[in-house]
Image (cartoon, rainbow, N blue to C red):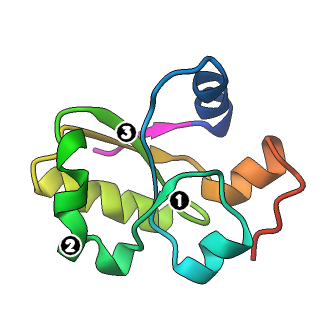
Amino acid sequence: MIDEISVEDLDARLKAGENLFVLDVREEDEYEAANIGATLIPLSQLEDRLGELAAYKDAEFVVHCRSGARSARACAFLKSHGFANPVNLKGGIMEWARVIDPTLVVF
């Protein structure tokens, strides 16, 4: 089972100054169009770039994409590779734009 976090909860935690790692698994063009400042590792590159995430192997961190589907796959992949607690952002950046920051242009 993949844990999820709502955009409201993530926003509150970030605004509270929590040092929470956020991973964006969308493609570069999607990230360039609209992002929330997360680290970008596209899902298509995740397997080859796992080493970049080693520091978060035992930590809770949030994974997001456009709608939540790719990030759910990324979370499952990360769990299968020993990551303890990747958490999927429910609704992805589309939900973030709808609820938190309507100025973001998401395609």
Q: Amino acid at mark 3?
A: Phe
Tell me, for residue 61, which label it has, or none: 3
Which residue position is annotated with label 2?
Answer: 47
Please give the name of the residue rendered at 59% of the width and 33% of the height, measured from the top-left corner: 10
The quarter of the rendered structure image containing the N terminus is top left
> In the rendered view, does 107 fall on the left or right side of 65?
right
Residue at the extreme top of the image, as rendered: 16
Q: Quick one: label 2, few (<14), some, or many (20+) residues within 10 Å?
A: some
Depth order, front residue of 3/103: 103
Q: What is the spatial separation of the Cα atoms under label 2 and label 1, in whole angstroms?
A: 19 Å
Seen in the picture, residue 33 relative to 20 is either above or below; the reply is below
Numbered disc in front, either 1 or 3: 3
Q: Which mark is residue 68?
A: 1
- Residue at x 22%, y 56% (from the top left corner): 78
Whether residues under marks 3 and 2 lie with C-beta atoms below 8 angstroms apart, the answer is no
Label pair 2/1, CB-CB below 8 angstroms: no
Residue at the right extreme, as displayed: 103
Q: CA distance from mark 1 to mark 3?
A: 15 Å
Amino acid type indicated by mark 2: Glu
First reached walking from the N terminus: tag 2 or tag 1: 2
Highlighted range, magenta:
1-5
56 and 74: which is toward the camera? 56
Helix, strand or loop status at disc 1: loop
x, y (%) of residue 16?
62, 17
Question: Which disc number belongs to residue 106?
Answer: none
Q: Secondary structure at mark 3?
A: strand
Horizontal side of residue 2 vs 33, given as left or right: left
At a point 72% along the width and 49% down the height, the residue shown is: 96
